[in-house]
Amino acid sequence: MTAIAVQAQRLLGPKRPHRSFFESFIRTLIIVCAALAVVLCSVSICDGHWLLNDDRLFGLWHFCTITNQSEPHCLRDLSQARIPGLAVGIGLARSMAVMAVVSAIFGLELLMVSQVCEDIRSRRKWAIGSFLLLVAFILTSGGLLSFVILLRNQVTLTGFTLMFWCEFTASFLFFLNAISGFHINSLTQPWDQQMKF
């Protein structure tokens, strides 16, 4: 009997208002762009080679020397590059970049869950997801800045590799999606307010 009463209450209760096509499109676009940023950031970190200077290749995981007639000779011991503080600094930049990916994955998950399982807490999940994307932006920016500061004497604009620019683009996308997520949430009304006449 109680099961019938609960089902009747659900059928007769107020139905969730439908979102406009524009709002759904914007939220979907934010999720897709955030997913693209996660992929770019992950690929950039896994490859890790960010700066080419003459015959030396600097990265998050290795330091490589390149000669014309042989394969790159890579070392995990970054102190072999003979740059003061490089090993510790790159370790910090690497940690920030990895934590950025973790934060972005959790943020992306919350954004998707808030759209798939729409309820009263959806806006809160969306806001937390946007906040985690903002944290990912701060961490990726910190990692990039640390890398550039550490290797400031070797940096040239043409020396940055494609993987560096992937990380830079991912950082920009994290920022753009986080701000857009907060903004679209502030423009729309909560579910409980929409149900009031």
Image (cartoon, rainbow, N blue to C red):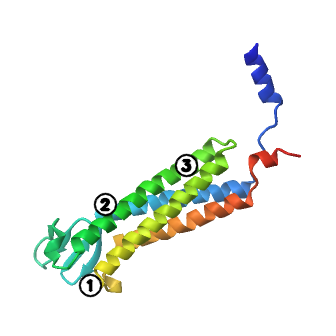
Which element is circle 1 on?
Answer: loop
| Whether residue 157 can be seen here | yes
Image disc number at residue 154: 1
Whether residue 166 is visible: no
Question: Is disc 2 surrounded by few (<14), some (14 to 19) or many (20+) residues within 10 Å?
Answer: few
Q: Which mark is residue 34?
A: none
Q: Secondary structure at mark 2?
A: helix
Q: Is residue 48 left or right of residue 65?
A: right
Q: Using a 10 Å C-alpha cutoff, classify the residue at mark 3 as few (fewer than 14 neighbours), some (14 to 19) or many (20 or more).
A: many
Residue 17: x, y in percent?
Answer: 78, 45
Q: Is residue 60 above or below residue 159?
A: above
Q: Is residue 42 left or right of residue 187?
A: left
Distance Cα–Cα, label 2 vs label 3: 24 Å
Residue 122 is left or right of residue 51, and the answer is: right
Label ID, residue 110: 3
Residue nearest the observer in this picture, 186 or 66:
186
Q: Residue at x 50, y 70 (%)?
A: 172
Where residue 111 sits: x, y (%)? 57, 51
Tell me which amino acid carries mark 2. Answer: Cys
Residue placed furthest toward the left: 69
Mark 1 residue type: Gln
Task: Tell me the quarter of the picture where residue 4 sits.
Answer: top right
Residue 2 position in % (x across, y down): 75, 16
Tell me the residue at 71%/57% (across/down). Answer: 23
Q: Label 3 amino acid? A: Leu
Which mark identifies residue 46? 2
Of marks 2 and 3, the one in the foreground: 3
Of the numbered discs 2 and 3, the one sitting upstream in the chain is: 2
Measured in 3D between alpha carbons, the distance from the residue under mark 3 to the one under mark 1, in whole angstroms, is 40 Å
Quadrant assignment for the N terminus = top right
Q: Are marks 2 and 1 in contact (CB under 8 Å)?
A: no
